Structures are given as C-alpha cells and as structure tokens.
Amino acid sequence: MSNIETPVRVRFAPSPTGRMHLGSGRMALYNYLLARKTGGQFILRVEDTDQRRYVPTAEQELYDGMHWLGLQWDEGPDVGGPYGPYRQSERKEIYQQHAKMLIDSGHAYYCFCAPERLERVRQEQMKRKEQPHYDGTCRALDPAEAAARVAAGERHVVRFKTPKEGTTTVVDEIRGAITVQNSSIDDQIILRSDGLGVYHLAAMVDDHLMKITHVFRGSEWLPSFPLHHLIIRAFGWEPPKFYHLSVFLKPSGKGKMSKREAADLMKDGFSIFVKDFEELGYLPEAVVNWIVLMGWSYDDHTEFFTMQDLIEKFSLDRFNPSPAAINFSKLDHFNGLHIRSLSHEDLARRIKPFFLKAGIQADDARLLRIVPLIQHRIGTLDEAVDMAGFFFRDEVTPPVEDLVIQGLSAAQSAQVARRCLEVLKGLPEINVETAEEPMRALVEALGLKPGQVFGLLRSAVTGQRVSPPLFESMAVIGREKVLERIERAIRLLEGM
C-alpha cells in the first residue's frame, strides 16, 4: 500500500460555499503529496452544483490558499487540461446523459413528488420513530408513463433505484471493509429539477471520466459510501480507492470542529481558515507540517518536515482514522521550528510586510542585521514588530516606572544612568566587544546586579522590558542614537 509503482491521478474537489478551512487544506495537501510522490497528476475540480450556497469570492480564496500553502495543480478551471470542464456547473449535460443511462438500464427513475408531500411523509415517519426515507411512490411508476410526464414538461428529479435485497460491502482503505443492508440505503436524488447533478452522481461520474485512481474525502461521507459504490457499479465501472480522513475536533477535544467556532477562535488570535494564518504571522511551511500530522504520520518520533521531505516520505499506510483535536500550541511549536530553519535573507523578506503594515519603514539592510538577534525569540512573523520595532524609530519613550531600578529611587536611578552614559560616551563605538566589559565593571563598582543596571539600559534604549540582546541591539541602533535615548531616559527620571 505504501509503495505505489504507477503514477496516480487524484483530485481536490472543494465546493465554493465559504472560506477555505484547515480540513480543505489538509485534503488538498494529501492529494498533492501522493501525486508528486508517484509522478502522477493533481487535479483541481470545483464542485459548484449547489448554486444556493455558492459564494462568489470562495473560488479565488481557494486558489490563493492553495498557492500560499505551496500547492500547484496540474489540471483545473484556471489551467485547463484534457478532462475538462473542471467546474461542475459547466458539466450539466454530462450529468444529464449519465442519469439517462441509469434510467435506461433500470438503475434510476424519474420522481415527480412535490417537496410539500415529501416533507409531510418525513414528518409522519419521524412520528412513527422511523428513519426518514423516500417512500418509493415514483419508484413503481411505469417507465413509459414517467417518460411521457417528463416530455410534457412536468417538474421532476431523478432518483437512484437502490436494490432492496441483500447487502453491499465497500472497502475504505483506512478502516477496512464495511457491509450494510441494502434496505438501509435510501433512493437518493442524483439529478436535481434544474438538471444539475448532485454530489452522489456528479462526483462519481467526474471521478470516472477524469480517470481518478484514489479519492481522499472526509469521514462524513462514510454513510453515503455504499450508495456511491452502487452507483459506480451500476455504470459497470471500476471504483477508485477511497480514503475517508479523520475529522478535526475542537481544541478542547470535545466535539467536531466547525466554521461556527471560527469567530470565537479569532478573538483569541486563532483561526481555522487558511487565509488567516498568513495574516497571523504563520509560515505556510509550518501550517503544512502541522496539518499533515493531523491524521497521518511517518513514524512515532519524526515531526519536522519540509514539503520535499513529505513528498519523499508520504505513504498510504500511515493514516489514522481517529479524530484529531486542533492543537494551536503545536502549530506555534512548528512555526518556531520553521522560522529558525530559514536563512537570514528569507526571514528578513518575510517579516518586512508586517513592519510596513504597522507603518514602520523597515529598510532591508537593517532588517538583515536584526534577524540574527530575533530569529530564536519570535514564534510568529508578526511578533517581529513588537520585538524589533524600536530599531526603526527615531526615538522611544519607555514608561518611566520601567526606568526605576528596583530598590532605588528615581533620582538614584538617574545617577546610575548618568554613570552608564559616561562610560558609553567614552567608547569610539558601542557593541558587544567594546561595551560589555566596561559596563560589567561599572555594575560591580556600583555594587548593583547586572540585571538592575542592564534592565534600566534596556528600557532606555529599546523602550521595552523585553528585547533582543542588549549590546547587540545597541550596535544596530548606532552610537549616537543610543546616547540620545539614555539622555532622554535621564530627563524622564529627573522629572519624576
């Protein structure tokens, strides 16, 4: 199972009914990895037959999200290919033809039942504590009569005629064989009254015509799996291999994760939507690393993967059907690992937009000098602004209470700052090599602890209590500006 000899054809087939979420990202990723691993094709197919739920901006967000994750497809609506169209709304006639094929072979039938009648029947069944199902009224219609009513323009749908005797066994490649009684499978609608195929028909037809060999989809499709198998077999086709992926649970581990929780997550700085991760300062490499391990593993200890690692190591025998809780702490962990793996030039390029967004004109040369100081201190790209924004400001204004050394008064702290200023003024330049030794000698002479004096200096020079290493930061800020900031801090302390 893990070593596929022949190139596969796989598809990511999202519905443009909302924003691209983590589940879609993972689905696309698994397809992409298998295609690249085997030298096969990765197809993007937009399943937009549910026009009532269609969101105009959703398709572009799918494209943007997949590109951000580093996924490129070989065939799709925007790039074309030999098996198009790749939007289901443009394949209406194909579904109508195949529905007619099933009707002609006795595997489907026209249904003329009005929605009001169906709802009434459903309510009565629920009162009797029955599982709601179609009662088969039109299943018994004479085919000639049904065809005549269709020809006369009567509104109708097409339903699949499920066998009512015996059992159907399907194989999910993750969970194994599943057997159900055919009597438990409803006669589902496969073609709507508007002539568009529903998923049960459209996806099966498209997978066959597009020569799909392996299908990844959510475990919510497991109840419909036997129906889909019957539809495929009714055409006389060989089914692809199906993999029903584990569901995502809420971070608490209780209950399935859904889009409804997204607003609450954003309040805490988290999201389940792929596009948001970029704005929150996460690397696409980290998001890929994170989501690939929610349902798949390489072994029981390897956790850091680049995309190339995943392509080389991906296999079909390491899926886990157990639900996976969305662990944002794990994402932060991976983001830190991937930030630290970047070259200085690459990290500088990636953090620059966050400075610009904050209104800070960060020049490339200084960014390159700053990156080594913050690379091991930030967990997300946006944290670079809070950590290192002071490097680009003309002046900083620390809270005066941060300048007061613990155990000393403001006036005594000002005296300490003056002594620091004298030492630093006597240096031709300020950096680790020139400043650290004389400053430590001053600390000893003052009878204070390094943390007390250097804490005052840190606040004075950076405007914040937490910063990159002090003397390295001073070197980047520059001698004149360092002296100006200490003088300003002295004035603030003397003005208390």
Image: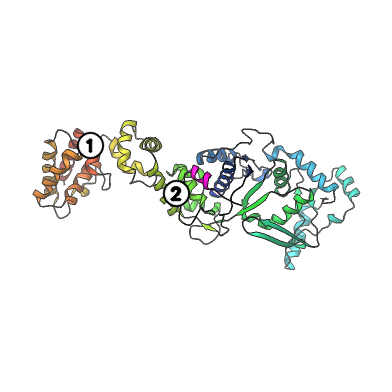
Q: Is residue 481 visible?
A: yes
User: Residue 20's mark?
Assistant: none
Give the dominant element type of the magenta stretch: helix, strand or loop: helix
Q: Does the magenta portion include 310?
A: yes
User: Residue 65 location, x and y as percent?
Assistant: 53, 41
* Label 1: how many Cα within 10 Å (few below 14, some 14–19, many 20+): some
Name the residue beneath numbered marker 2: 304
The mark that comes first in sequence, 1 or 2, is 2
- The figure's colour scheme reads rainbow
- Asked if labels 2 and 1 touch by Cβ distance under 8 angstroms, the answer is no
Name above or below for residue 459 compared with residue 126.
above
User: Residue 493 location, x and y as percent?
Assistant: 16, 45
Identify the secondary structure beneath mark 1. Answer: helix
Name the residue beneath numbered marker 1: 475
Q: Nearer the viewer, mark 1 or mark 2?
A: 2
Q: Does the magenta portion include 256?
A: no
Name above or below for residue 430 compared with residue 320.
above
Residue closest to the eye, 18 or 431: 431
Q: Is residue 137 left or right of residue 188?
A: right
Identify the residue at image location x=69%, y=48%: 240
Identify the residue at image location x=64%, y=43%: 6
Residue closest to the eye, 192 or 449: 449
Q: Residue furthest left?
A: 445
User: Residue 115 location, x and y as percent?
Assistant: 76, 53
Q: Which residues are magenta?
A: 306-316
